[in-house]
């Protein structure tokens, strides 16, 4: 089983469009681990041991459209975690103890349309709203099963 995705683990691979690391024991992703994998459109990292997503964790995945990080003991997503993911349109971070997201964490994901945050520990919706930049056109945000305690008044 894989525990760390190091920067040289995936070098030399043919250019896949889908990658799944489902059910390994990945604890961390080094910057550059995906460098050169410019054709990857879907990445599945469900059911691992990821506790944090560091800045530039997905560097090099310029074509990535779908990212799944669910069922990890994820407690922290750092600013810059989704940098360079300009084609990301669907992100699922569900069944995780995540309590919040940094401001503008999705700044570099202008194509983001669907954000799935089922069963997280995020206590208020405003934590989500401040993480999505105004330029984004997110159509669906789902927080089913999360302990939302407050819902702010939204004014345009």
Image: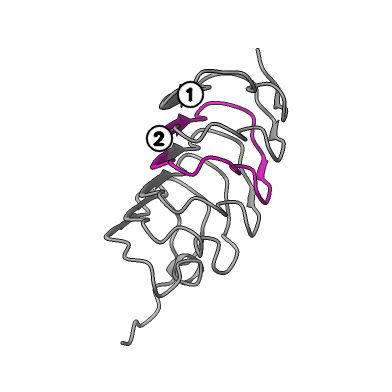
Residue 109: say if magenta: no
Mark 1 crowdedness (10 Å alpha carbons): few <14, some 14-19, many ≥20: few
2, 76: nearer the viewer: 2
Determine whether the residue tagged by mark 2 lies in a helix, strand or loop: loop
Q: Point out the tag, 2 or 1, that comes first from the N-terminus.
A: 1
Mark 2 crowdedness (10 Å alpha carbons): few <14, some 14-19, many ≥20: some
State which quadrant residue 154 falls in: bottom left
Determine whether the residue tagged by mark 1 lies in a helix, strand or loop: loop
The residue that label 1 is drawn on is 15
Residue 58: say if magenta: yes
Identify the residue shown where x is 72% and y is 30%.
7
Q: Position of residue 112 (x, y in %)?
A: 37, 55
Quadrant containing the C terminus in the rendered view: bottom left
The answer to whether residue 140 is above or below residue 46 is below
Marker disc for residue 41: 2
Q: Name the residue furthest top.
A: 1
Identify the residue shown where x is 50% and y is 37%.
69
Q: Position of residue 16 (x, y in %)?
A: 45, 23
Quadrant containing the N terminus in the rendered view: top right
The answer to whether residue 145 is above or below residue 150 is above
Main secondary-structure element of the magenta-colored stretch:
loop
Residue range highlighted in magenta:
40-66
State which quadrant residue 151 falls in: bottom left
134, 72: nearer the viewer: 134
Marker disc for residue 91: none
Q: Position of residue 51 (x, y in %)?
A: 67, 39
């Amino acid at each position: 089983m894989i525990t760390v995705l190091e920067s040289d683990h995936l070098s030399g691979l043919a250019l896949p469009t889908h990658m799944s690391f489902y059910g390994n024991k990945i604890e961390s992703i080094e910057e550059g681990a995906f460098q050169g994998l410019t054709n990857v459109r879907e990445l599945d990292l469900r059911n691992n041991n990821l506790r944090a997503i560091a800045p530039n964790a997905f560097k090099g995945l310029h074509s990535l459209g779908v990212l799944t990080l669910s069922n990890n003991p994820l407690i922290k997503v750092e600013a810059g975690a989704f940098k360079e993911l300009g084609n990301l349109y669907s992100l699922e971070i569900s069944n995780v103890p995540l309590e919040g997201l940094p401001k503008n964490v999705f700044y570099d994901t202008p194509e983001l349309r669907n954000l799935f945050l089922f069963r997280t520990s995020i206590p208020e919706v405003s934590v989500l709203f401040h993480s999505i930049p105004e330029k984004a056109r997110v159509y669906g945000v789902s927080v089913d099963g999360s302990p939302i305690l407050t819902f702010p008044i939204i004014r345009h």
